[in-house]
Amino acid sequence: MINPLVLKLEHHDVLSSEEKRVLESMISRMREFRADEDIVSQGSRLTESNLLLEGFAARYKILMNGRRQITALHVIGDFVDLHSHLLKKLDHGVIALTPCQVAVVSHDNIRRITESHPHLTRLLWLSTLIDSATHREWLVAMGRRSALGHFAHLICELFLRLQAVQRTDGYSFQLPLTQAELGDTLGISTVHVNRVVQELRTDRLITWQGDVVTILDWNRLIQVADFDPTYLYLEREPR
Amino acid sequence: MINPLVLKLEHHDVLSSEEKRVLESMISRMREFRADEDIVSQGSRLTESNLLLEGFAARYKILMNGRRQITALHVIGDFVDLHSHLLKKLDHGVIALTPCQVAVVSHDNIRRITESHPHLTRLLWLSTLIDSATHREWLVAMGRRSALGHFAHLICELFLRLQAVQRTDGYSFQLPLTQAELGDTLGISTVHVNRVVQELRTDRLITWQGDVVTILDWNRLIQVADFDPTYLYLEREPR
DNA sequence: CTTGGCTGCTAACATAGGTGAATTTCCCCG
DNA sequence: CGGGGAAATTCACCTATGTTAGCAGCCAAG
């Protein structure tokens, strides 16, 4: 049932059938989460990692003054806290933004993979490196893009990531975030999120009704976003 | 000569003498860079990684409009692009901020470690995970802290990181960045960097003369910064 | 069918931070 | 010691984004 992870990893390199088997067999059990429920809470000591099989989730931190910043959005096939197997204690929380289904993998099983399957280990390592590359791209977006460009950039990114796990339909995909959550993601206020959304709409770049986003003009959107997909590393090669 | 890397890794876990030997022997050669020279240029295909032995370096990206964002600062002991061994092509450049001395490690040698030294592999993986945790903390700082808090936060972080590799002297350390470079790091303008620096000075939180920063009141500084060092993972435990 | 609570949307006003242009200070180098 | 260029600093003005508040639409629960 971890097909989405396999699907994702196969965008980066070839997996042997033995490796796919190992990935299948590492799962201990399944868990379900309601929307707004914590999948992992900040600071807790962990012995298992969570692989998202259904739904949207987010990594976040809360500051002393109560403000929240979302530092990553996760979709099907993402290992939301693979890094906890070495960090042991997470510096952030992970929250389910929609109802989520999660495959649980014990840290012992991950360690066993690192002891006996070097290539698979490198692919898991790679997936954390792509998380990191995504963090960098978000840093650039936060620091040097306008709110409009930042949001456009996020749309581009989500579109490609969802496409990689076959969750797009033409130029449409599900974006089940409230504008408040989006504000916490982009680092802006809810009011300003709304202004930016209105602008993308009147410019006929996107449509956003209910929780479905449709990209109306991809070329113009990537231009507004100054989007370059290199950081997603969606090219298959030996790793 | 890779003592600073050993020093850094030993903050996270115990290293066997065999492991230290392997780390020593993985180095192919040394390289020197002048200030402002690229250590790695964005987008190039790589076959070696670079370990910083002396100097300050930064990861950066440049946007179409010419603006630059620095996404990481690196000090002695940091592997500035260990991740290139799996990403192959970097999504960012790395620039020497001061004259730098670098130990070069071929990707082949790193791969060999992943094939034969699982524990060392996990420690190298861990070091990239801490990069990632740092990116997350910077995201929070960019998105939800004031410019003042953000700069204060950076000072706290650099102090602890430099302390870990024995490059602090009491509450003083070297910060060889221009205010323009600092602006690219914090995602603000040079003029505003100056305003923020003035404010930290008049509040008697820090001193910054030449390239030496001195923290005058650590407790008040971490409060202004809302600083929590968890994300640096400076605790030794089995990984 | 009604109600309450979230979410989206707007408006009016406030401010952190940006921009462009001097001016001053600091050093490096001859 | 003197000159030149980079870096720091300051100023005046501008704008993107934040804040507070209110209202409307929707939907789930009763």
Image: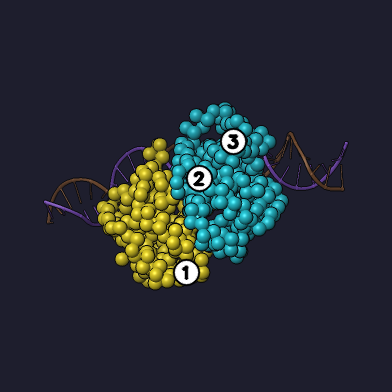
Chain colours: A cyan, B yellow, C purple, D brown
Quadrant of the image occupied by residue B169: bottom left
Query: Badge 2 local density, few (<14 within 10 Å), some, or many (20+)?
Result: some
- Give the chain of mark 3: A
Q: Rounded to the nearest whole Å, what is the CA distance between mark 3 and mark 2?
A: 39 Å
- Give the chain of mark 2: A
Query: Badge 1 local density, few (<14 within 10 Å), some, or many (20+)?
Result: some
x and y, in percent, of residue B232 in the image: 48, 62
* First of labels 3, 2 by sequence position: 2
Question: What amino acid is labelled 2 in the image?
Answer: Val
x and y, in percent, of residue B138 in the image: 48, 54
Residue that label 1 marks = B13
Q: Residue at x 27, y 53 (%)?
A: B33
Question: What amino acid is labelled 3 in the image?
Answer: Val
**Disc assigned to residue A15:** none
Dot 2 lies on which element? loop
> Disc 3 vs disc 1: which is toward the camera?
1
Residue that label 3 marks = A197
Residue that label 2 marks = A14
Q: Residue at x 50, y 45 (%)?
A: A14
Quadrant of the image occupied by residue A113: bottom right
Question: What amino acid is labelled 1 in the image?
Answer: Asp
x and y, in percent, of residue A16 in the image: 53, 48
Q: Residue at x 45, y 68 (%)?
A: B11
Q: Is residue B187 visible?
A: no
Quadrant of the image occupied by residue A66: bottom right
